[in-house]
Image: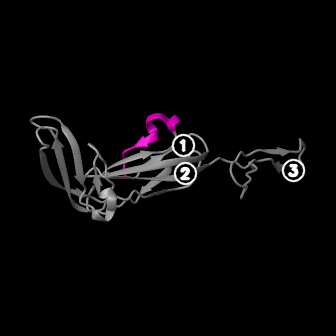
């Protein structure tokens, strides 16, 4: 608002949102209002200036509050060295989804920590739990974010000992393998003969 003479000395906003009660109005110059429902709202601004006896003017403009898309995804649980698959199942609401902004929660991987693909894959450099996030943005710049823990299991470490018999005889083998994560469920031996 720019007065042609004098200075604006008062602002009165009506956000066209009666269910908001006393929060439906503001006397601030540059307020913010949180709408809880999607709809069209008539927003009115009344300004007064210190010129003369207090000149007033009013403007009303409709705004449309659009729904946010719903950011949803799931992942696979993998062992270190395998790629984690990120399956995007985000839902646009009355709009088209235009962009996907993934963060895999592994800043040390540099540029590979992010992706703009709809259903990307990422190979983590270490075992552990990472917080991955997805921001989806629609054609109206409405956005939503979701986060999910991603688990990458450490690989088991195979090792064994054997008795030091060098003669043709029965040799005993003992597994000294260590589990990387969880328990060792299966061991398979190949004696090379």
Secondary structure type for disc 2: strand
> Residue at 26% across / 43% down in the picture?
29
Nearer to us of marks 3 and 1 is 1
C-alpha span from label 2 to label 3:
41 Å
Locate residue 41, reporting x and y percent: 22, 60
Secondary structure type for disc 1: loop
Q: Earlier in the sequence, mark 2 or mark 3?
A: 2
Judged left or right of residue 156, residue 55 is left
Q: Is 116 a magenta residue? A: yes
Q: Earlier in the sequence, mark 2 or mark 1?
A: 1
Where is 56 relative to 62, above or below?
Answer: above
Tell me the quarter of the picture where residue 164 sits: top right
Q: Which residues are magenta?
A: 107-118
Query: Marks 3 and 2: in contact by CB < 8 Å?
Result: no
Q: Which residue is disc 1 drawn over? A: 124
Q: Which residue is disc 2 drawn over? A: 150
Q: Which residue is disc 3 drawn over? A: 172
Query: Marks 1 and 2: in contact by CB < 8 Å?
Result: yes
> Residue at 52% across / 35% down in the picture?
108
Judged left or right of residue 9, residue 57 is left
Query: In this figure, what is the number of numbered marks?
Result: 3
C-alpha span from label 3 to label 1:
38 Å
Locate residue 140, reporting x and y percent: 25, 52
> Residue at 65% across / 47% down in the picture?
155
Secondary structure type for disc 3: loop
Question: What quarter of the picture does the N terminus occupy?
Answer: top left
- Between 76 and 148, the one lying in front of the other is 148
**Residue at the farthest front position:** 53
């Amino acid at each position: 608002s720019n007065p042609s003479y004098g200075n604006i000395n008062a602002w009165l906003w009506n956000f066209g949102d009666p269910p908001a009660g006393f929060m439906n109005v503001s006397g601030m110059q540059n307020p913010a209002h949180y709408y809880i429902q999607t709809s069209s709202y008539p927003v009115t601004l009344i300004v007064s200036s210190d010129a003369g006896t207090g000149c007033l003017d009013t403007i009303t403009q409709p705004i449309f509050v659009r729904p946010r898309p719903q950011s949803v995804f799931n992942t696979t649980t993998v062992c270190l060295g395998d790629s984690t698959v990120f399956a995007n199942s985000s839902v646009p609401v009355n709009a088209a989804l235009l962009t996907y902004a993934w963060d895999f929660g592994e800043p040390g991987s540099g540029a590979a920590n992010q992706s703009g693909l709809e259903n990307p894959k990422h190979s983590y450099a270490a075992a552990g739990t990472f917080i991955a996030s997805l921001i989806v943005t629609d054609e109206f710049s409405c956005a939503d974010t979701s986060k999910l823990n991603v688990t990458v299991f450490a690989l088991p470490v195979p090792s064994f000992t054997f008795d030091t018999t060098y003669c043709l005889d029965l040799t005993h083998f003992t597994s000294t393998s260590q589990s990387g994560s969880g328990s060792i469920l299966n061991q398979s031996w190949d004696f090379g003969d």
